Each structure stands twice: as structure tokens, then as C-alpha cells.
Amino acid sequence: MERAGSARLSMRRPASATCGPAARVLVVLALAVGCGGPSPARDGVAADPAGGRAGVGAAPYRPAVPPVRSRFPAPVAESGAETGAATTPLGRLMRSLSEPGGYFPSDNLVSNETSYLHVVPALKALGVRGGAYIGVGPDQNFSYIAHVRPEIAFIIDIRRDNLLHQLLFKALFEKARNRVEYLGLMLGRPLPAEVSSWDVASLDEIVLYMDTVAATVARFEEADSLLLAAIPEYGYPVTPWDLETIRGIHSAFFELGLGIRYAQDAGGRSRRYPTWRQLLLQTDLAGNRGSYRASEESFRYVKRLQRQDRIVPVVGDLGGPHALAAIGRAISARGLTVSAFYVSNVEQYLMRGPGFGAWAETVAGLPVDERSVIIRSYFARRYPIPQTVPGHLSTQLLERIESFIETVRTGGYLSYLDLVTRNAIPLEGRRAGAGAE
């Protein structure tokens, strides 16, 4: 979740503005391709040379844009203001933990961290397992969840759109029988003849299938109707505008396929970031595929947590007054401790204002033990650090939460660079790899 520029397009808009459904879907698509650059999914193999198709060729993908529904009434407020009551334990928990949505200068539908799996061997070596997981952002959290195996997970993000995105993911996990159906539903691809036979397929085989089968508007509409119908059943109040935003997110994945990328801002700089295809195929420092889609067993662990309502999306600022502290109380009430807390590079923003002090104070109140860790991402443009792996724009880092609390208590960190390096736990097996193009 690297820093984005100040110029920005957003899926939200002031309540007084007027904007038709087609325009709102196109805004999401513009964000996903960096607002104006060539579409990676339409550029064929050449658009993704660094890790693109796992060494296999495929015909360029050129989908049609899905038609926009007319069933949604005029949008409501900018925040997707909740007009109804939460009707399930999950919905009530989400609502009680959340703060009002805040500002972040990009709408990231996928991660931009090719190094996200580099900490996995160290997590295993440190015995980071079980307990409660906390993380920020979209679906990279599911890979950490698959490895840490928490009893409950909270995904907190300042953007309310991320909560809506998480509801889409929840519907995908619950409706998909396996990994190939999960990606087929998300990307609008027809399914293979015998879906169950793909349980034993490698991730490379699944990616190849998604890259070669043609997406269709009919398949997208079928999947979209299935998923949108499921979301209100989760008991969190969503408005027609919320559902239209979720459809816009889904449409972006349909239009761009596995070539979708993190979109930074209106400057069109997203093309230096990895595609979703590259992120799926990343490895840990031992060279092992580690995404939650790498094995059916990992996928089904996350699917089981979703079905049991044990992955809880929350709207909140890590430096805010309520959400994170409330998550801590919810974890304590369950008799658990935090096992892993993935913060990406959010602290870089918090250090620019008073938010870091509030963040550190709240972390000091979380239930932790000697194995609890913070997972960070660092983007080494001007200041490379020892754990930076050649070929990767991002660097993943670990710090024990107890070390963080003690350092803050005894004087604090001198800078963001000091924060990410002082107590960083060494990662074994440092190796070069295919990062962003």
C-alpha cells in the first residue's frame, strides 16, 4: 500500500453530485488501470513480462465490457450511509467495531507488494500461529491467514470501500467450491467441465486456464447476480450505492482479468506495479508458492473461516479513536492474543502527524504475547535496507509487538527508517525474485 500522489479519482463522490451508473463503473475501471494507461489485460503477454504467465504462452485476452444494470436507484450519500440495522451477529460486530470511513489517496483493488510472502518461513520458524489476526488492505490478508491459521481475523482499513470489497470476497469464498471456481466467478470466466477435478490442479494450471478461456458478459452477469444477492444476507446494512460500488469493483476484475493492478492516482503510474497474476504466482524466500490459492487446503481454510463469519471486515484508522481498540477488546473477550498484525506501510503515514502516538498507545493495549508480530512493507526507492530483495519494489519486515511497545516506552523511533530497521527480525533464505515490472 505504497504512498500515492495527491491527485485522485474515487469511487465515491459528493452527495450533491450527479453521476449515472455507467460513469461510476467506468471510474472504477479507470482506477484499476491507472486512469488512462493501456489496459494490461488487452495488451496480451507483452504487458506482463516479469512474471506474467508462469512460463507458458496464452492468447491475449480481449473481453467485452459488461452492460450496466438499471435496477439501482439514485445513489445515496458519499459514504454509503447505513440506513438499516445490522441483522446478524457478524453485521452487528462489524458495525460496532467500525469508525466512519476516512481518506486514503488511492483505491487499491489488489496489493502492490510482490514481497508479501517473504516473511512466511520466518512466521513458521517463530511459531506465529493461531490466536487472532489483524490486517489491512484487500486479499493479501488471506494468504497470511492461510499460513497463521488464526481462530478469528479482523481486516481493518480506513477506506469503507475496502469493507465492501471484503463482502465481495466473502461471497466469492462461500459460493465457490474450489479455487478454479473462485477465480471464474471473480473474472467472469466459464468453468471447466468437471470443476471438482481441479481440486488437485497446480496454481500454474489454474492461471493458465484463466488466461486462455474467454470471459463472457453472460458469465459475468450470472456471477454478479449470484454474489450481489448473497451480500445483504450477511446482516451488515448496505445501500443501493454500496451494491453498485461492489458491482463496480467486480466489473474491474472482469474487464482487466488477471492483469488488474494496484492503481495509484490520476497520473497513470500503476503500470510499474505488479499484476494480480504476478501476485498469485509469487513465492516465499524458499521459492515455494505461498498464496492462499496455491493449494486447495489453504483455500479451504480461509473459506471455512468465511463461512463461520470469523473474518470480520472493519472500517477504521489505525491511528483512530475507536476501531483498533475495539478490536483489541473483542480479541481479549475471546481469550485470545494477537498472533500477527499486518500493517503494510500505514505507519509511514501515521508518522507524518499525531496519528502515530495514538497508534502506539492502542498497540500497547492489545492482548499480545512473546510470539506476536507486526508485518510491515517498506518501499525502498531512495533508501534500500538490508532485507530488500533484488527485483522487488517492496520489502517485507517482521518485528515482535513486544519490542515495538518497549521501544516506544523507552524513547521511541527516530524516523520511519529507524522504525522498519531497528528491531527487524532477520528473514532467512534471501533471494532475488521477479517483482514489479
Image (spheres, helix red, strand yellow):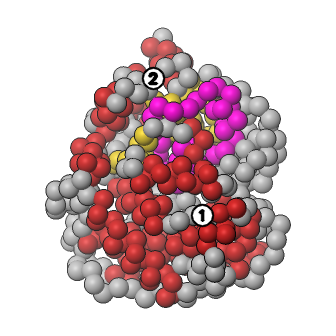
Which residue, given by chain and number where applicable, does mark 1 sit on?
179
Residue 91 position (above or below residue 404) = below
Percent x, y for residue 404? 51, 22
Residue depicted at 29% across the width and 49% down the height:
90
Q: Secondary structure at mark 1?
A: helix
Residue named by callout 2: 368
For residue 425, which quarter of the picture? Answer: top right
Front: mark 1 or 2: 1
Residue 337: x and y in percent read 43, 26
Q: Quadrant of residue 230?
A: bottom left
Nearer to me, 46 or 148:
148
Q: Does the rendering let one see residue 121?
A: yes
Q: Where residue 44 sits in the image (x, y, percent)? A: 72, 79
Q: Which residue is at a point 34% across and 36% down the rendered structure image? A: 327
Q: Are marks 1 and 2 in contact (CB under 8 Å)?
A: no
Categorize mark 2 by other alpha carbons within 10 Å: few (<14), some (14-19), many (20+). many
Kindly report the distance in space between the C-alpha atoms of the residues bearing marks 1 and 2: 33 Å
Determine the secondary structure under disc 2. loop
Kindly tell me whether residue 382 is visible in this rendering: no
Depicted 377 relative to depicted 126: above or below: below
* Magenta extent: 116-145
- Residue 220 falls left or right of residue 309: right
Q: Is residue 344 left or right of residue 91?
A: right
Left or right: where does residue 138 sit relative to residue 434?
A: left
Residue at x 76%, y 75% (from the top left corner): 45
- Residue 244's disc is none
* Point 71% across, 58% down: residue: 281
- Report the quarter where the C terminus lies: bottom right
Give percent across and percent down for residue 294: 67, 55
Nearest to the observer: residue 251 or residue 370: 370
Question: Callout 2, which amino acid?
Answer: Val
